[in-house]
Image (cartoon, rainbow, N blue to C red):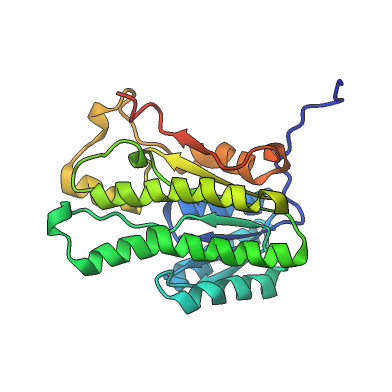
Amino acid sequence: MTLPQANFSIDLTGQAALVTGASSGLGLRFAQILARCGAKVALAARRLDRLEKITEDIRADSGEAVPLETDVTQTDQLFQAMSKAHAALGPITILVNNAGIPDGQRAIKMPVELIDRVLDINVRAPYILSCEFARRLIDARLPGRIVNISSSIAFDYGGNGSALYSISKAAVIRMTEALAVEWARHNINVNAIAPGAFASEMMDGLLERVGDITKGFPRQRLGNPAQLDSTLLYLVSPSSEFVTGTYIRVDDGQHHR
């Protein structure tokens, strides 16, 4: 069968998205690009002042957004974020689990408190949010898209004290695969992006600790968050309707040495 045009669209009109870690870095860019493509966006992060400024900018660009002060280590705040987003924007049909933190210490030197925090933010929070997101959509008989942000370090231990970060991001990949199978019959697609080294506040902290890491990369550069636009939009748009339970590495060949 010949189609009149390519089966591709990034028009998100009528969709509502919740993005965690939206106050800076990749999460900020994700929120902005989703809004520019027509989605209403709830921005969740701890720094409310930043969220309010980003919300103002999105609205000035004719988008619709709401700021949600959220600490993803607090269980009640996870449920509140989803409830507030739903109340403000209608059913949330896109979830981007972006919030994450590095460890930055050798495994045997990490205090238990830091171990708990890394796992709470990188694994526990996206799991709880995903389940609440899916529960609401299943009850309403609506389709949805989840995009979990993993990392290329999930597949290649990056050194510099990142063992637990690597483990947590590998868990995100497996969570993506397992939940995709469980929810496929409900038309909820679950996929992941595994970025390489991109410019962000988190990356700034790493560079301060270990120096310029780009010298060992094939093209000796960091990614620009805008270079993830096409991958994100593909996974949340109608174009990827037949894609679930997978991940896309976007790392400029950094971890294929």
Task: State the image coordinates of residue 241 (x, y, percent, origin top left).
Answer: 71, 40
Q: Residue at x 34, y 29 (%)?
A: 254
Q: Is residue 236 above or below residue 222?
A: below
**Measured along the vertical axis of the image, is residue 158 above or below residue 135?**
above
Labels in figure, total = 0
Report the residue at 39% width, 43% height from top.
151
Residue drawn at the location 29% of the way across and 66% of the way down:
116
- Residue 53 x, y percent position in the rendering: 51, 66
Q: Is residue 239 shown left or right of residue 224?
A: right
Q: Residue furthest left?
A: 109
Residue located at (15% from left, 51% from top): 106
The front one of 102 and 137 is: 137
Relative to residue 182, is residue 203 drawn left or right?
left
- On screen, residue 225 versus residue 163, left or right, reads right
Residue 54, compared with residue 12, is above or below; it is below
Res 91 seen here: no
Where, quadrant-wise, is the N terminus in this rendering?
A: top right
Q: Quadrant of residue 141?
A: bottom right
Q: Can you give x and y, in whole percent of width and height, for residue 7 in the image? A: 77, 31
Q: Is residue 77 above or below residue 251?
A: below
Residue 80 vs residue 185, the one in the foreground: 185
Q: Is residue 217 visible?
A: yes
| The C terminus sits in image quarter | top left
77 left or right of 254 in image: right
- Image coordinates for residue 253, horizontal then vertical, percent: 38, 26
